[in-house]
Image (cartoon, helix red, strand yellow):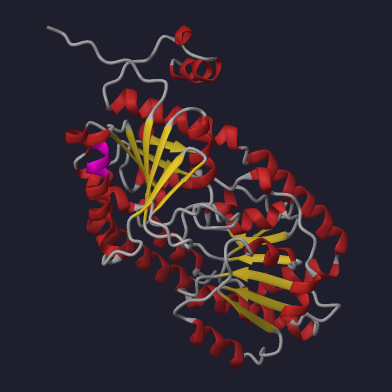
Amino acid sequence: MWRTKPELPEKLNLCFTAIRFPILGRAADHGFLWPIARALAKRGHSVTVLAWKNPQGKTLIKQDGVTAYFLGQDKPYSLRDFPQVVFSKFSELHEQNPFHLVHSIDASGYEVGMRRRSFGVAMAYGVDATQMSQLFSILGMSQESLGSLLRTSLALVYKFLTTFYGKDRKLLKTADALFVTSPQQQIILERYYLYPDYKTHRVPYGIEIGDLSPREKSDELRQKLGLPPDAQTVVTITDMTELAEVKNLLVAFEKVAIKKPSARLIIVGHGPLRFAIETEMLNLVLGSRVIFTGTVTNQLLPDYISVADIFVNLSSRTTGLEPSILEAMAQEKVVIGSEVSAIATIVEDGSDGYLVRPADTVSLSSLMLKIFADPELTQNMGEAARKKVIDLFDTDKMVNQTLLAYYRTLIRQAGYRSPRVTEHNNSSQNLFSQLRT
């Protein structure tokens, strides 16, 4: 006897897993998660989040239809235990109300993914679940010389072999779908990670555009930071875990400070390499020109971005779109990003921002001086940057693309059949119609 496949449900029971899940904050890590989760819940889908901790110190937050459990809050676990803790909580919740699909933004859902068949769920990961970001970090530090290119090539081969065979290959075997943010990531996954292209979904996750009203420069914050009235400012945000990224910016800014004595570099963030970065700053005799703010809450980050004339983020370690750069673009700032990071798929060099190789300090310093010398260029580029972000990161568009990927994954991997379009509401009809194309 042939068993009829169940019809794809219109309303899904979804589980997100992520170490960081910010409920508040426009420029937070994985800042796209909250608006996506909230929008899914608004459309009638059941959304549960399993995360690590939150600044509010709560173990459970229910907000706008989303239920978020923070499993590391006030518990004697270490972060390396998180995947197993996620598995235990998921098992408990799944028994009460079975999930259709799990979307693990990082590798925290791996233990669930290994047992997805027995749970009867489909498993999707974000590209941050892999260690691909380490490859982009190595690419970002290369220079245009034969010796540097050879060293970079050897480092890339070694890092790929160790990360792919050490962890990524096992994880990808548990993935029914993988979400990426750029064509470059999709190509790398297919060619080098041997991951099927039809299982890869490109959704340009960014930030919630509904709250991206431009902010005026805060005179109070400028006074707090000790900025001269005529100061032209460069702002960067860093977790201070990679010395080379910040060192390159300091070296480039030294040339700017010589020609523009009133210029200031504001470094937002804190991390394990703070002392080493401060040492580099002192060696370059930039003590009075560089301002360290320390840790700043997600709610206040937009205020610090607002005082910038130029916003720089040279990180190539992330495989996603940096929310802080998108925030700066939305605030009509001139942004400078890494040409080997995912932001290169958003920024059009010379039109709505600039792209440089992080190790090219000469080009970086020349760019900053050029921007400072041309206020009209700054205004026009800032306006173009804001328009780019507003046009691209429409929450409804991101949710539609995400749902379409979920539905396709469930049909392909979980044994559901395509629904009859006429039986569903207009929003679902449009998505279900696309499943047939």
The answer, for residue 173, to whether it is visible in the render is no
Q: Nearer the viewer, residue 151 or 394?
A: 394
Q: Image quarter for residue 91? A: top left
x 25%, y 14%: residue = 5
Q: Nearer the viewer, residue 372 or 121?
A: 121
Could you say where residue 21 lies in the image, as x and y percent from the top left?
45, 53
x 58%, y 56%: residue = 25
Q: Nearer the viewer, residue 165 or 65?
A: 65
Whether residue 170 appears in magenta in the rendering, the answer is no
Could you say where residue 307 lies in the image, as x and y percent from the top left?
75, 68
The answer, for residue 136, to whether it is visible in the render is yes
Q: Nearer the viewer, residue 70 or 251?
A: 70
Please indicate whether residue 37 sits to the left or right of residue 212 in the image.
left
Please indicate whether residue 35 sits to the left or right of residue 62 in the image.
right
Q: Image quarter for residue 218? A: bottom right
Q: Quadrant of the N terminus?
A: top left
Could you say where residue 269 lies in the image, as x and y percent from the top left?
55, 73
- 214, above or below 392, in the image: below
x 61%, y 61%: residue = 299
Span colored in magenta? 90-94
x 26%, y 65%: residue = 77
Counting every numbered tag in the picture gives 0
Please indicate whether residue 26 sits to the left or right of residue 36 in the image.
right
> Most prominent secondary structure in the magenta stretch?
helix
- 433, above or below 33, in the image: above
Could you say where residue 18 lies in the image, as x and y percent from the top left?
38, 52
